[in-house]
Image (cartoon, grey):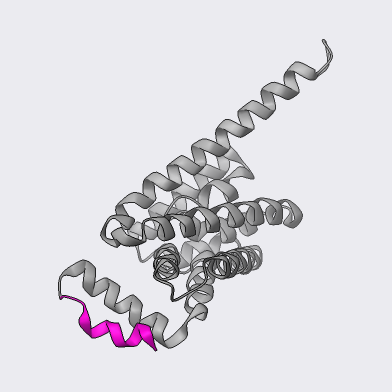
């Protein structure tokens, strides 16, 4: 396979060492690496699903993968993973999340952050957390533990999965010639997507407010 033949040609600096490991991963598992990487991260495991998706999109830029298929697989993996996490959280509740994070201060801190997001933003946390590294791991399990209605969870989960998969994949594709910058760029991409969504929601709210009859709640 083309990917495997190029692994040994990379220079031994850190970023290229990372690239070599991803090339090995994709040379063995192909699109399945995208599906399981994204799915496992969204199910609640600390797997670098976003980075895997970025690299798959980079390979699409090189012609090894098809971009549309990468986006579709990532969206399916993200949606399924979050629903698995939701089911685990619903069944195990808050005590299960405590047991999962108690040996890691970093993971426990992320859990507390996710709970704070839920208190401030409610169901929108499921959408917002998709674009926040670390919080994405806890969105599904915590939504289940807090007994969010599943239809509402599915709506925000799927909406976020579609936008996130497209945004991250396009970032990896269009910055394909600058892989070393991708991991630094991605935080800005996530922030920009969230800002755009917030602006659209604000404009829709303004439009709704103006069309409401006076005195209507």
Is residue 34 one of those drawn in magenta?
no
Q: Is residue 36 left or right of residue 183?
A: right
State the extent of the magenta-drawn residues as a range: 1-11
Residue at image coords 73%, 19%: 209
Find residue 193 and report its horizontal and vertical position in percent.
Answer: 50, 43
User: Is 197 placed above or below 184 here?
Assistant: above
Residue at image coords 57%, 46%: 125
Q: Is residue 173 left or right of residue 23?
A: right
Q: Is residue 138 left or right of residue 89?
A: left
User: Is 6 placed above or below 141 here?
Assistant: below
Residue 20, quarter of picture? bottom left
Find residue 207 and report its horizontal and vertical position in percent.
Answer: 71, 23
User: Can residue 47 be seen in the rendering of this structure?
Assistant: no
User: Is 203 placed above or below 93 here?
Assistant: above
Residue 11, quarter of picture? bottom left
Find residue 50 and report its horizontal and vertical position in percent.
Answer: 44, 62
Is residue 5 one of those drawn in magenta?
yes
In which quadrant of the rendered image does the N terminus lie?
A: bottom left
In the orientation shown, which residue stands out farthest toward the top? 214
In which quadrant of the rendered image does the C terminus lie?
A: top right
Type of secondary structure dominating the magenta stretch: helix
Q: Is residue 31 left or right of residue 214?
A: left
Find residue 81 and report its horizontal and vertical position in percent.
Answer: 58, 68
Residue at image coords 21%, 77%: 10
User: Can residue 207 be seen in the rendering of this structure?
Assistant: yes
């Amino acid at each position: 396979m083309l990917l495997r033949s190029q692994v040994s040609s990379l220079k031994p600096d850190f970023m290229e060492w990372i690239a070599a490991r991803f090339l090995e991963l994709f040379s063995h598992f192909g699109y399945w690496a995208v599906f399981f990487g994204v799915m496992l991260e969204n199910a609640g495991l600390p797997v670098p699903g976003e980075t895997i998706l970025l690299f798959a999109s980079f390979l699409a830029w090189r012609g090894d993968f098809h971009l549309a298929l990468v986006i579709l697989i990532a969206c399916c993996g993200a949606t399924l993973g979050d629903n698995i996490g939701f089911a685990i959280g619903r069944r195990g509740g808050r005590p299960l999340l405590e047991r999962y994070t108690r040996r890691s201060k970093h993971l426990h801190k992320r859990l507390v952050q996710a709970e704070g997001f839920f208190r401030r933003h409610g169901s929108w946390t499921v959408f917002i957390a998709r674009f926040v590294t670390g919080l994405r791991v806890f969105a599904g399990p915590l939504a289940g533990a807090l007994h969010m209605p599943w239809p509402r969870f599915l709506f925000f989960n799927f909406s976020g999965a579609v936008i996130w998969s497209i945004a991250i994949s396009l970032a990896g594709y269009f910055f394909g010639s600058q892989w070393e910058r991708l991991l630094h760029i991605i935080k800005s991409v996530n922030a920009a997507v969230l800002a755009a969504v917030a602006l659209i929601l604000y404009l829709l709210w303004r439009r709704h407010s103006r069309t409401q009859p006076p005195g209507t709640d």
